[in-house]
Amino acid sequence: MSAVIYDTHGFVKKLKAVGFTEEQAEVIAEEQKVLIDEHLATKRDLKELEQSLVIKLGGMLIVAITVLSVLMKIL
């Protein structure tokens, strides 16, 4: 996946401002960073997936048309 910029320091400051301890805020920020890095799809990721699917669909269409034309000649 592509990199996503995530300001953990700013997030920790916000959590501390509303009453979290430094340790709690840091643990939450780190876990959120891991979730973002490992599970969040970016626009680039989605574009790459879309291109891959289009190529695969095109290939399947070519195979299907070829099979149908062969069957039509046989029958």
Image (cartoon, rainbow, N blue to C red):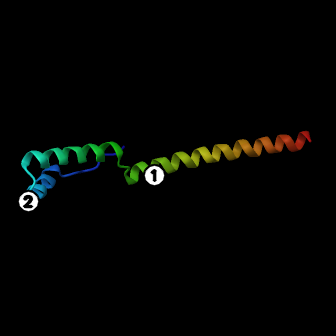
User: Is 61 placed left or right of 53 in the picture?
Assistant: right
Residue at 62%, 47% in the rendered image: 57
Screen quadrant of the C terminus: top right
Nearer to the camera, 24 or 41: 24
Local secondary structure at mark 1:
helix
The reply, left or right, for residue 54 in relation to residue 60 is left
Kind of residue sitting beneath label 1: Lys
Which label belongs to residue 38? Answer: none
Q: Residues within 10 Å of mark 2 (few under 14, many from 20)?
A: few
Q: Residue furthest bottom?
A: 18
Q: Quadrant of the N terminus?
A: top left
Name which of mark 1 and mark 2 comes first in the sequence: 2
Q: Residue 72 appears at what percent x and percent y? A: 87, 44
Quadrant in the picture for residue 60: top right
Kindly give the residue lying farthest to the right in the view shown: 75
Q: Residue at x 16, y 44 (%)?
A: 27
Query: Taking 26 as reference, is 73 left or right?
Result: right
> Mark 1, mark 2: which one is toward the viewer?
2
What residue sits 29% from the left and 45% below the top?
Answer: 35
Q: Is residue 7 above or below residue 38?
A: below
Circle 1 residues within 10 Å: few <14, some 14–19, many ≥20: few
Three-letter amino acid code at disc 2? Ala
In this figure, which residue is indicated by the disc labeled 2?
A: 17
> Horizontal and vertical percent for residue 33?
24, 46
Q: Which residue is mark 1?
A: 47
Question: Is label 2 in a helix, a strand or a loop?
Answer: helix
